[in-house]
Each structure stands twice: as structure tokens, then as C-alpha cells.
Image (cartoon, rainbow, N blue to C red):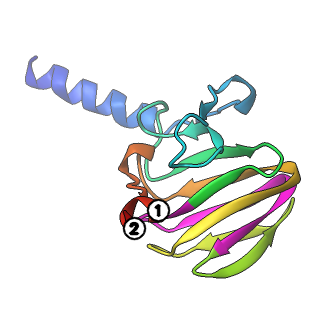
Amino acid sequence: MTQTETAQFELTAAALAALPVIANANHAPLEGGEDPAFGTVRWKTLFCADRTQTSGMVLGVAEFGPEGTLLPHRHGPSEIYFGLDGSGVVTIDGVAHELTPGMALYIPEDAEHDTVAGPEGLRFLYVFAKDRFAEVEYRFSAAQAT
């Protein structure tokens, strides 16, 4: 590639990165639910540099069936939850917090937290200040205790 072609490619990549990106949760694949170390939570990743022309932020929707769980864990980046549907309890460093539609929770970096959905299940947005979901290293408390 010539120097001119390289410069044109870099300008095109920068222009694409500056464009708005739209994601439709109804068309995103549902992941998770198979690994008992995680619990029964499933999720749809909407913005992630591996899948979309985005950077600096990962956004997705976590989905729990009735009484569904995300087991106690920690990770390096802070996280935000925003309740969409249903209800549940998110325990952060031993303190229980109700999560319902319209409520937001900030989970500090490396805080131990878990989630238990209510009888009608739970859906919430999650946000990490990372480029990729793969950059979030989950450390499950039960796995560390063994």
C-alpha cells in the first residue's frame, strides 16, 4: 500500500468511527445461560468494538428468567445497570439494592456483586467503559474459593 493509499484508508476509518451506530436488541444474538459458574443470566451485547464500529463503551441487555441469577463476581472496570423490565436484587459488597424499571446502579471497580431476579424475571442495560466485552475479566467468587 502506498503512503497516499494508507493516508486515505486512515481517513476513511476515522470517518466511519465518527458515524452514529444503531443496534436493535431484537436482532442481537442471545448469549450465555450455559455455564453454571455464571448462573442462569443471558445477555445481548449491542455495542462492542468486536461487533460494531464503536469504541470506549460496551452496552448490552442482561435477561433473567423468574428467580434467575448472576453469581457473585468481580471485574476491573466499573459497571452501570439500568432497569428495563421486571425486578431483582443486586447485592454489591454485601449490601442489597433493588433494581426495577427506571432505576440505575453504579457498581464500583472490583466490587463483589451478584443479581437475583424476582418472580417475573428481570431485564437491565449494562455498560462498561471498555472497547470490547472480552476486555472485562470476570472473577467469580465461588471459583476463587475452591
- The outermost residue toward the top is 1
- The outermost residue toward the front is 146
Q: Are marks 2 and 1 in contact (CB under 8 Å)?
A: yes
Q: Quadrant of the N terminus?
A: top left
Label 2 environment density (alpha carbons within 10 Å; few <14, some 14–19, many ≥20): few
Q: Residue at x 18, y 20 (%)?
A: 5
Residue located beneath label 1 in the image: 142
Left or right placement of residue 78 versus residue 88 in this view: left
Report the front residue among 24 and 89.
89
Amino acid type, mark 2: Ala
In the rendered image, residue 134, in percent from the top left (x then y), is placed at 39, 44
Q: How many marks?
A: 2
**Is residue 21 part of the magenta span, yes or no?**
no
Residue 35 numbered tag:
none
**Is residue 75 part of the magenta span, yes or no?**
yes
Q: Quadrant of the C terminus?
A: bottom left
Left or right placement of residue 127 versus residue 136 in this view: right
CA gap between label 2 and label 1 equals 5 Å
Assign a secondary structure to mark 1. Answer: helix
Confirm whether residue 74 shows in the render: no
When asked about the image quadrant of residue 103, the answer is bottom right
Residue located beneath label 2 in the image: 145
Q: Residue at x 42, y 56 (%)?
A: 138
In the rendered image, residue 62, in percent from the top left (x then y), is placed at 68, 46
Left or right placement of residue 140 versus residue 127 in this view: left
Tell me the magenta residue range: 72-91
Dominant secondary structure, magenta? strand
96 in relation to 25, above or below: below
Q: Residue at x 54, y 44 (%)?
A: 36
In the rendered image, residue 105, in percent from the top left (x then y), is placed at 69, 70
When asked about the image quadrant of residue 140, the answer is bottom left
